[in-house]
Image (cartoon, rainbow, N blue to C red):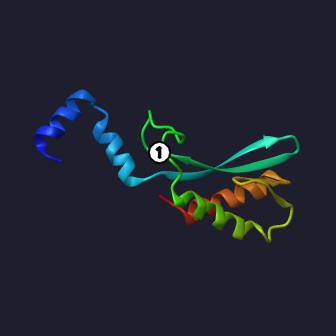
Amino acid sequence: MSSAWEHVVNSLGPEYRKCLDALNDGPKYKCSIFKKGRQTILQLEEYWNIDNMHHNTVDKHTGFDDHIAWISDQLINWPNVRRLSWDQWAFNNKQDAEKFQTFFNLKWAN
């Protein structure tokens, strides 16, 4: 992009550079844990490294599917875990969910 055009865009929208960098870097992924009844739910979430850009503003990248597939492959043999939906798994105890969350964070460290 020419410097004159970039100057105009930056003056109209000061968040332009941050949004452009976030789009170039792509989304990040995290596993969040919450309680639902007696079970602990692990959910994969996509987020962007910019405050005003929510996960719904940009189409999902194939990286989300790759992470889902990896989690499914890992959890298929774990006892007391069952899949609830495309991006959620139910654990019978919180410690197992936290252990998997740590495993996920080590594997997919940003």
Q: Hey, which quadrant is residue 20 in on the image?
A: top left
Q: Which residue lies furthest to the top in this view?
A: 12
Q: Which residue is drawn at 71% across and 54% down?
A: 86
Q: Hey, which quadrant is residue 83 in on the image?
A: bottom right
* Total numbered circles: 1
x and y, in percent, of residue 104 in the image: 62, 61
Q: Which residue lies furthest to the left in this view?
A: 4
Closer to the camera in the image, 94 or 26: 26
User: Could you tell me which secondary element the residue under label 1 belongs to?
Assistant: loop
Q: Residue at x 85, y 47 (%)?
A: 39
x and y, in percent, of residue 23 in the image: 38, 48
Q: Residue at x 45, y 37 (%)?
A: 53
As drawn, 95 above or below 5 = below
Report the amino acid beneath label 1.
Trp
Callout 1 crowding tier (Cα within 10 Å): few <14, some 14–19, many ≥20: some
Closer to the camera in the image, 73 or 108: 73
x and y, in percent, of residue 94 in the image: 79, 51
Q: Name the residue under label 1.
A: 48
Residue 39 as seen in the image, left or right of residue 7: right
As drawn, 61 above or below 21 = below
